[in-house]
Image (spheres, rainbow, N blue to C red):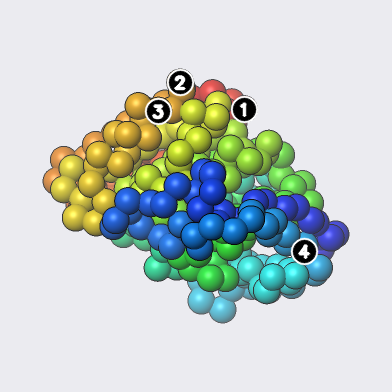
Amino acid sequence: MTNGPSRFGLPRDNGNGAGTPRPPDDGGRGDGDDGGEDEEITLSIKGVRARQSPDREGEVEVELDTTRGTITLDMTVAEGSTGVAVFLGGAGGGSTGPANEVYVRAGHMLVPRGITSVRVRYRDAGEWEECLADTLGACSFLKGIGAQQIVLVGHSFGGAIAIKAAEMSPMATAVCSMSTQRFGTFEVEQLGKPLLLIHGSKDEVLDKAASEDVFERAKDPKRLVILPGGTHSLKEHPEEVYDLLMDFISANLQSGGAKA
């Protein structure tokens, strides 16, 4: 598995634009320094290493050697597929997902549907610009190996990363954001792609008002699901979260991205 050099840039937020300082307890460390000029973060992929996962059967561990460090991807590969689900964790850096490791479960079950999945391990978890660069770097790598469509799925901090990355990547056909934070979603009206929001009614970390606010500002097609009694991890509703993700990912890859 090889991939040629890939380069892109994104503006670093130093408190001057979309980087309006986040509200207290809104997750992540993305508000940047006060003042100063915006500078551009650039990331180039210099090389790729791949091996069978030492931890999980049926997965491939891919290391992207970049100009900003090594990005690690855990992949379940559907041979010949051009549609990929990209899963993003929260500010703590976990990559297996909420709702009892739903990313791992969904990733393996998407293979029979002809869909590859990727779990992104952040280089610097919780740092907004770096995690966004990791996500876009993963998308660039996937394009280089033949992917044509991507559905981005994120939880908490990663939910906002998923929304922003979907705004920026032409490959993204849809995005699902679970237990999302507000920071990073300030331009969600520019998304223009199907959006699924999932939140627990008893989220103790980020109130469901965050997803309700994103939903109000987003354009159609969009859907908001509030799970009764669900906490931030959504562990109370593993089956419902799994079903929602599987249906959403399948519909928006196989149909070219049209359903929320």
Which residue in the structure is indicated by mark 4?
45
Which residue in the structure is indicated by mark 1?
256
Q: Which amino acid does the dot numbered 3 rest on?
A: Arg
| SS for callout 2 | loop
Q: In the figure, residue 260 lies in which quadrant? A: top left
Q: Label 3 vs label 1: CA separation?
A: 23 Å
Q: Label 4 vs label 3: CA separation?
A: 34 Å
Q: Label 2 vs label 4: CA separation?
A: 35 Å
Query: Residue 217 shows which numbered tag?
Result: 3
- Point out residue 228 in the picture as x, y percentages from the top left corner: 16, 40
Residues tagged 1 and 2 counted as in contact (Cβ below 8 A): no
Q: Is residue 11 in view from this perspective?
A: yes
Which residue in the structure is indicated by mark 2?
220
Q: Label 1 vs label 2: CA separation?
A: 16 Å
Q: Label 1 vs label 4: CA separation?
A: 27 Å
- Point out residue 118 in the picture as x, y percentages from the top left corner: 57, 56
Q: Closer to the camera, 25 or 176?
A: 25
The residue most toward the bottom is: 54
- Point out residue 166 in the picture as x, y percentages from the top left corner: 57, 40
